[in-house]
Image (tube, helix red, strand yellow):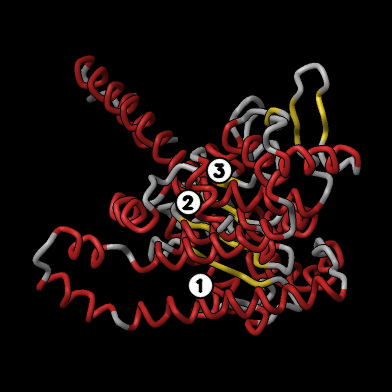
Amino acid sequence: MALGSIILNSPQSTPGRRQALQRESATLECLMVYLGDMRKIFVSHASADKDFVDAFVDRILILGCGLKAQDIFYSSRVSTGVASGQDLLSTVRQAVKDAELVVAIISPTYLTRPVCVAEMGAAWANVGKLFPVLTPGLSRDDLEGILTSQLIRSCDDSDLLDELYDTIGEVVGQRRYVSNWSTHKLQWQDLAQEKTSLLGVPDRLTASQARKLRGEKEDAMAAWRSSLEEIASLEEKIRLLTEAKTREEAVAALVPRNEAAIFKTILTRLETSYRALDRLTANVIRYDVILNDEMRWPSDDDYTASRLANEAVSNSTLVLDEEQNTLSPRYDIPAQEQLKESIEALALFFQESSSDFSTWFVKEYGYPCDLALQPLWDVLTRR
């Protein structure tokens, strides 16, 4: 029996005292419900890895750590994900923001998904909020970007699982000790290798695409090394800030280093996916993702755009609505899907970025952080 019930039913409890206790109990219950909603564990993963992550969530988070469905935001399940009728991007964005711990299941497919990278970057920006784990067979040598500086182990590593168990106990505010945690952990370790076959497989590349990707990877690594150099020079930036004599000098010194690194990583992925398509098709995708609208057929005065539109419709890479005279993308084509994900990731980053970053961005690019602006789109894609 709960302590409140014992006191309420006590012979020494007066009617006035019982009413006061009832009000306090109701208030406390409402507060516990509110806090329960805020204490969510966000499972960041690639949707292609659903079958593997399902097993991890069930065996480790629910059975092993004693979590309930309402403790977890896991978008690949109806009971723990986005409710029908809700906007996917805004709901996921809010869930990452509200979560006290983001468990990122890093797989080969995860590393190719811009939205996953954005989720991970948002969690990494808050010290202690990101708990990344590797799927079996993936090594730290396969990682890039912000992950290269992280100590990451495999999701079947015994010490890592014990650390995750303790961390979740601290996050939920009380330790939900499970008497047979060790049993569930051992069962998962045996199961993990078997479930590895259920992981998604990234799209395979042709030899020419592989050569192009290697070149783009070198560019990305150069950009990342440049970011590391900026972080190493933080003390110099602080000195410049204290000596700044103009507002412009102060703004340049205030841009958060982690946001700059995340932005460059996402922008590099956008440029890479953009180069795989023609300019018209890329703009049609931008209209769909950012403006939630279909792009009208180009005017006859724009010869290049009209030619590209005719070729795209003829090759069935874009869909023509003859009645409305508009064009829409085809996301069953991998290159178009990849650009869509890159645009979504950058839009999500812009919405979550700090005011200091926004101020710096306007000064650097001449436009606010709004992908609906055609001139800004042209600047970012260098066309």
Q: Which residue is mark 3?
A: 92
Q: Which residue is mark 1?
A: 146
How far apart, in angstroms, are the residues tagged by discs 3 and 2?
12 Å
- Would residue 354 appear left or right of 221 to someone viewing this image? left
Where on the picture, by quarter, is residue 135? bottom right
Residue 30: x and y, percent?
37, 29
Quadrant where the image shows the N terminus: top left
Q: Amino acid at mark 1?
A: Ile
How far apart, in angstroms, are the residues tagged by discs 2 and 1?
15 Å
- Label 3 crowd bin: few (<14), some (14–19), many (20+), radius 10 Å: many
Residue 349's mark?
2
Q: For this rendering, which residue is in front, 82 or 296?
A: 296
- Would residue 155 appear left or right of 37 to someone viewing this image? right
Where on the picture, by quarter, is residue 269? bottom right
Q: Closer to the camera: disc 2 or disc 1?
A: 2
Q: Earlier in the sequence, mark 2 or mark 1?
A: 1
Q: For this rendering, which residue is in front, 322 or 340?
A: 322
Q: Earlier in the sequence, mark 3 or mark 2?
A: 3
